[in-house]
């Protein structure tokens, strides 16, 4: 009975996949347009580094205001959660670990570094968020 | 498989979620929700990278799972088992890991730039190489600096400042050497120079932290927090990754603000903390010659303390690092419960630099089930001391010393203090009569309305609880 597949079900699945693919393509098209727009707006003359720098500077400003609004009683969890989010360096670690072996002589070394970085970052991701959660769950109101 | 622009937008999304994670911490009610935003942001960043890298070779993917498995289990184990008193050490260790990961990712990008879309080995952009060396250098400083901070906080190394002769000259020399290596690295892309940068930075990290004493640890740990952020941001620039750039900026400014708050709490300039040499674990002997003039201190037992406390209408508890060392927070909460059951008003006053990291006391009290709305910051509670019958100071000293307000020659002059002197009675739970980290005598000990309770903080509070019931 497990072998019998409802043909209607199959059709539905196919339709769903197609819709998903279509959505992804549309999203990609939009993203491409936004990027093209951004580059056109700058006349293509601005180095992408400047865009990154702009984002960096804005994030520093946002960080400044957001962190000042953190209540002092939660400064320890603030520290552990900033620790946890810094482990987004895992992005770099994943790229290193997945370097294609065929690209050149350095790729093996790069992958070893990536493996180590990924291990370290994973300690931080799991440890950082969990210990923050553990601390925050201790903060209770009178009652 | 994923288009580069979509990936960038997803990274941006996780960056925004991280901002929301920090925003949640503005109140204990929204904090856990914030933490969840952080987790989602991390999941998006990880998944995006995995999808972007498709197709994965089987062996690469296998090793990725192994690494996440090993790292994840260690992380879960540490997070579950760590004692709350040991949080500063754990956080220092986590900073070290981020620092080392930054070095490794930068090295990996140097060895196989093709894998990161950074061009071909030997002909990378100057900007990229600059960002890469910066990421590696800050990461390396964060790594060894945090390891030293960990060793000091964990008591595996003396908390006393270690002062090398000519240490400022050595540090400046190393800093210049670092700059020379970075400028030699950019045109040559030589692997050897890269490792020299890392090596010099390792040394610099050690030398920057060893001269800083135990009492300045809250600043050090905040500063290393900030460094780990800047390291992540530099790696983010190298890899052109928005999530990393945003996160690095957030963490960097967060650590910097915390350092500032801590310095202000001690009335010390950031520069003087960095230069080090202040505040060992064993205090300097009190200035000689004055010993004979001191009036005798009034000592009390647990029974005396219980009587004084039970006669009060309002008690303010001032916990300090000594409470954490003695693990007295649970006994303290028990004492508070008894007092509250007798209709006595109990509040807790926290000095900004109490403990070994920002907010450490709040976590310990929360762990002992003290509701957070009974715990107050310095500015909120200070006006209330004059209306309090008893100030119960446990394991704190310098942060209550009136000399900070009156004696302009004192080492702690100008530091904001908790005005326990205004309470009708002051009880000091202390191991001995020694002065605090700053090596400054506390005149409060010799006042008429002060009773000294000498002994281990936990045993003393247990004794008081027993005497009360």
Image (cartoon, coloured by chain):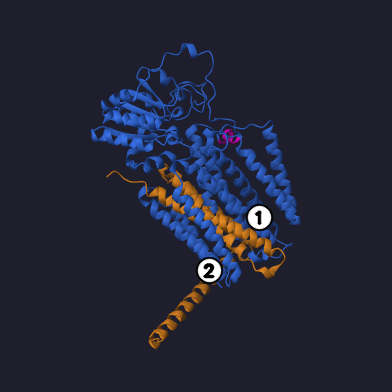
Chain colours: A orange, B blue
Along the viewing direction, whichever of B326 and B97 lies nearer the viewer: B326
Q: Would you say B366 lies left or right of B268 here?
A: left
Q: How far is disc 1 from disc 2 in space, using C-alphas?
A: 25 Å
| Residue B182 vertical position relative to residue A104 in the rendered view, above or below | above
Q: Residue furthest top?
A: B292
What secondary structure is found at the residue carrying circle 2? helix
Residue B146: image location, x then y, percent: 57, 44
For the point 64% across and 58% down, the residue is: A113
* Quadrant of the drawing holding the N terminus of chain B: bottom right
Residue B89: image location, x then y, percent: 51, 43
**Tag 1 near tag 2, CB within 8 Å:** no
For the point 64% across and 60% down, the residue is: A112
Residue B183: in sight, yes or no?
yes
Segment tinted magenta in the rendering: B270-274
From the image, tell me which residue sits under label 2: B6
Give the chain letter at badge 1: B
Residue A42: image location, x then y, percent: 59, 64
Residue A80: image location, x then y, percent: 48, 48
Residue B25: in sight, yes or no?
no
From the image, tell me which residue sits under label 1: B132
For the point 55% across and 59% down, the residue is: A90
Which one is in front in this view, the residue at disc 1 or the one at disc 2? 1
Q: In which quarter of the image is residue A15?
A: bottom left
For the point 59% across and 71% down, the residue is: B58
Along the viewing direction, whichever of B283 and B420 lies nearer the viewer: B283
Near mark 1 (Cα within 10 A), the count class, few <14, some 14-19 or many ≥20, is many
Looking at the picture, do discs 1 and 2 lie on one chain? yes
């Amino acid at each position: 009975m497990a072998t019998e597949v409802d043909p209607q079900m199959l059709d539905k699945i196919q339709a769903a996949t197609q819709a998903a693919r279509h959505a992804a393509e549309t999203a990609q098209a939009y993203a491409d347009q936004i990027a093209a727009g951004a580059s056109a707006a700058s006349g293509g003359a601005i180095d992408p580094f400047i865009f990154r720098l702009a984002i960096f500077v804005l994030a520093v400003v946002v960080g400044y205001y957001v962190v000042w609004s953190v209540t002092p009683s939660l400064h320890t969890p603030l520290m552990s959660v900033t620790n946890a989010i810094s482990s987004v360096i895992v992005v770099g670690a994943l790229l290193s670990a997945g370097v294609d072996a065929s690209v050149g002589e350095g790729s093996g070394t790069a992958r070893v570094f990536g493996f180590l970085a990924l291990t370290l970052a994973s300690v931080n991701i799991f440890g950082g968020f969990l210990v923050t959660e553990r601390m925050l769950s201790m903060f209770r109101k009178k009652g | 498989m994923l288009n580069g622009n979509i990936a960038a937008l997803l990274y941006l999304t996780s960056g925004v979620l991280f901002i929301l994670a920090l925003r949640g911490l503005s109140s204990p009610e929204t904090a856990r929700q914030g933490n969840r935003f952080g987790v989602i942001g991390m999941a998006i960043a990880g998944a995006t990278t995995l999808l972007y890298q498709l197709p994965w070779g089987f062996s690469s993917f296998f090793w990725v799972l192994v690494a996440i498995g090993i790292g994840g289990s260690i992380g879960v184990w540490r997070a579950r088992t760590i004692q709350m008193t040991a949080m500063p050490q754990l956080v220092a260790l986590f900073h070290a890991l981020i620092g080392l990961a930054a070095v490794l990712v930068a090295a990996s990008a140097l060895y196989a730039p093709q894998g990161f879309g950074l061009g071909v080995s030997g002909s990378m952009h100057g900007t990229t190489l600059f960002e890469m060396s910066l990421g590696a250098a800050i990461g390396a400083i964060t790594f060894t600096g945090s390891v030293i901070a960990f060793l000091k906080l964990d008591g595996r190394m003396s908390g006393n400042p270690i002062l090398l002769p000519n240490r400022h000259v050595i540090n400046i020399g190393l800093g210049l050497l670092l700059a020379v290596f970075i400028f030699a690295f950019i045109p040559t892309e030589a692997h050897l120079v890269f490792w020299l940068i890392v090596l010099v930075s390792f040394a610099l990290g050690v030398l920057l932290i060893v001269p800083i004493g135990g009492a300045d640890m809250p600043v050090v740990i905040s500063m290393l927090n900030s460094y780990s952020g800047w390291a992540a941001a530099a790696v983010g620039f190298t890899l052109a990754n928005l999530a990393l750039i945003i996160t690095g900026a957030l963490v960097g400014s967060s650590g910097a603000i915390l350092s500032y708050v801590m310095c202000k709490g001690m009335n010390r300039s950031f520069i003087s903390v960095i230069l080090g040499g202040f505040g060992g674990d064993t205090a300097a002997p009190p200035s000689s010659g004055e010993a004979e003039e001191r009036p005798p201190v009034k000592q009390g037992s647990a029974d005396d303390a219980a009587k004084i406390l039970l006669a009060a209408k309002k008690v303010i508890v001032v916990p300090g690092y000594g409470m954490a060392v003695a693990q007295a927070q649970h006994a303290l909460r028990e004492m508070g419960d008894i007092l509250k059951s007798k209709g006595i008003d109990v509040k807790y006053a926290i000095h900004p630099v109490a403990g070994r990291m920002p907010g450490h006391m709040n976590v310990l009290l929360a762990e002992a089930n003290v509701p957070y709305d009974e715990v107050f910051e310095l500015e909120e509670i200070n006006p209330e001391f004059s209306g309090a019958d008893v100030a119960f100071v446990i394991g704190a000293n310098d942060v209550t010393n009136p000399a900070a307000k009156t004696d302009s020659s004192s080492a702690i002059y100008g530091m904001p203090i908790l005005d326990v002197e205004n309470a009708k009675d002051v009880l000091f739970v202390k191991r001995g009569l020694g002065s605090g980290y700053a090596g400054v005598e506390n005149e409060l000990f010799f006042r008429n309305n002060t009773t000294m309770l000498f002994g281990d903080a936990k045993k003393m509070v247990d004794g008081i609880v027993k005497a009360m019931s």
